[in-house]
Structure formats: C-alpha cells, structure tokens
Amino acid sequence: MNSAVSARLVNGPFGDPGLYIRLPWQGRAVVCDLGHNDALSMTDMLRLSHVFVSHCHMDHFIGFDRLLRVFLSQHRTLRLFGPPGLLACVAGKLQGYTWNLVDGYGFGLEVTEVGRQTMQRARFEAATGFRPQPLASLPFTGTLVEEAGFCVRTVHLDHRIDCLAFALEEETHLNVDTAILAELGLGPGPWLSELKRVVRAERPDDFRIRAEWRQDGRQHERTFALGELRERLVKHTPGHKIAYVVDTLYSADNAARIAGLAHRADVLFCESPFLHADHEQATRRYHLTARQAGLLGRAAQAKKLVVFHFSPRYSGQAEVLYREARETFKARQGGVDDRAPSAPSAVLNPSPATV
Ligand SMILES: [Zn+2]
Ligand SMILES: [Zn+2]
C-alpha cells in the first residue's frame, strides 16, 4: 500500500496560495484555499473530496468559480469548510450566475462555516438553482473531518478577521509482521483485519480474538487474548502530518495556536509575505515575516518548513526570503544540520520554497 500523502503548492511562492494534498491510497485529494488554480489539471480537480478555505480574501477564493465549473456536471457532493462568513460568500458567488438549465444535475456543495463555538452548515444543490438548504449545526471541536485513514483539524487565527489554519494527519499504519505470524504457527486471513480494528480501538488485553485461516486444504482456528498478539504481531508506523498556515498576525495567541496545530508536522507550509526589515508593515497587514515563519516552524518542531505567499514587492528576491526563514528555523538544529528532512523527498515534493 502506498501510504504517504503528497503535498504540493498549487502555485509558485509569489502566486496565489493553495496546497494540494493527495491521499494516494484512497485515490482522492483535498485542497487548502481556492486562489488561482489553473495550474491544477481537470484530473487533479476531480480527485477533490474536501476543500478547506482559510478565509475569503480574493487571493484565497477567486478559484471557487473554476472549481464549480469543473464539478457542475458531476453527480457528486463536494465538502467545503471555511471561517465565519463563508456561507454568505458561497451564496454570493452562486447568485452571480443564471441556473435555469441545471434541473437534472446531481452536483451538490455541502458548506460548513467554522465558528469558534458552532459550525453552521448548508447544502447548495444545482438541481434547485443552488438555493441554500440549512443543515443541522454542529459544535466546534477543532476537528473538521475524521474518516478512515485521515483527519483534518483547524484553529482560528487573527488576521483582523478569523482565518483558519489546517493540519491533515494520516492515521497510524498498522502492519502485521508475517515472519512473526509464521513463528506463532498462524496463517493470514480476514481475521487480521479484525485484529487491526480492535488494536486501533484499544480493546483491553483480555479481549478474545479468534484466528481462522486455511492452510494445506484445511481450515484452522485458534483463540487468543489480544494482549498475546498485540505487541509481537502488529507494527505501528506513524502517518504523515501536513500543516498549512496563511495570513496571520505574529501574536502570542496565534503563535501558540500554530505551535499546537502543527506540532511535529512532517511539513509545515507557512506564509511569509514580508522580510523582517519590513515587520512593521507585516504587522499592519496582519501577516508574517520570513523570520517569524521560521520561529513558528521551530516552535512547532516541524521536520520541514516550506515558506510561500511572498509579497510582489520582493519580486526577484525569493532567495532572500528563503534564507531569512531558514536562519531562524535551522537554529533548532544548532545551525549545523543542513541535511534533507527525514521524510522521503520524492513524496514530499520539495519546491524551491523549501527551507
Ligand atoms: Zn488575507
Ligand atoms: Zn493572502
């Protein structure tokens, strides 16, 4: 099973922000932010099941129209999450078009507006001209998606409006050691899936497991206490974690939230529009400097930091922004360890923005 997620920026560091994350074992993908997204192919777009919008400033939301156009003829539901105000922004976009010939279409958008206490939800269906249909609201717990294989969590950041940061975490992989299986005199069968399920559910050691398998044309069966098998037979491999942070003020509260969300992320994608020499301008604009991005990566103990969303004022000076972020981020490693991060680089798609 190819289990590693792969994440890549939709555009270059001076382009609109966006992060495309593939979940190869599920044949699908999610995206953070909807800036200009012409760089995503139709195939890339059609793999999307969830869209996470940090906030609705134009550079993060102008790509909504292309997404809509690509999905319109699909008989599917696309799930969209974003900060307070998202429902009105989606409704406004949808009201900008005429929908008199889409009655037979099966496309629907399920939109969740993530407040600090409550998540308001609505469904917009092509067949009804995208008239909003309210859905039951849910309490905000910090987790937006929890499915077999991965979860997505969020925190609210201060960008003079609420702006969401996201972290996608793959589930820990459980693998059965076939050598140990043979050593125990057991054979493979569907019971191993059940074993993994109860290990994941953290059932107690005295929980009984029935192993059934066919070998040499005969059916075999044995019963064990879970505690006898758990440690020896099942290997745990941590899943990948990807964090995405854009458009935020460098404040103590924001920094604490980011450090918690991105804690030990394999890759932290973090905005750094300004150089620290212009930090007053960055603060006025509720944005980060490259140096601050480096400090945040270090505080989160991220294994790798990718900075992006550079201000056009530094056009041609990308390397200066990378260097500034690298200098504070690398201080964690005593300023001497310049090796590639431990995660396989082919999987994590290093871009020129890598520091
Ligand atoms: Zn913004
Ligand atoms: Zn922005």
Image (cartoon, helix red, strand yellow):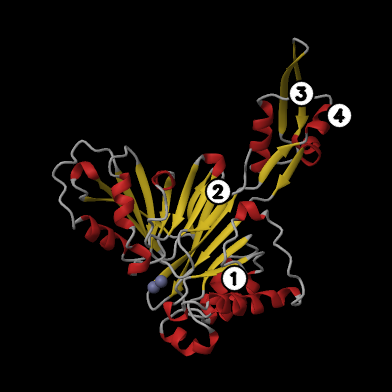
Judging by the rendered image, the residue that carries numbered circle 1 is: 259
Rendered image quadrant of residue 24: top right
> Tag count in the figure?
4
Circle 2 Cα neighbour tier, 10 Å, few/some/many (<14 / 14–19 / ≥20): some
Disc 3 to disc 4, C-alpha distance? 10 Å
Tell me if I can see residue 88 in this picture: yes
Q: Are marks 2 and 4 in contact (CB under 8 Å)?
A: no
Judging by the rendered image, the residue that carries numbered circle 2 is: 150
First in sequence: mark 3 vs mark 2: 2
First in sequence: mark 2 vs mark 4: 2
Q: Secondary structure at mark 2?
A: strand
First in sequence: mark 4 vs mark 1: 4
Disc 4 to disc 1, C-alpha distance? 44 Å
Q: The N terminus lies in which quarter of the figure? A: top right
Q: Secondary structure at mark 3?
A: loop
The three-letter amino acid code for the residue at tag 1 is Ala
Judging by the rendered image, the residue that carries numbered circle 3 is: 187
The three-letter amino acid code for the residue at tag 4 is Glu
Please give the label number shown on residue 183: 4
Q: Secondary structure at mark 1?
A: helix
The three-letter amino acid code for the residue at tag 3 is Gly
Q: Residue at x 57, y 66 (%)?
A: 352
Disc 1 to disc 2, C-alpha distance? 20 Å
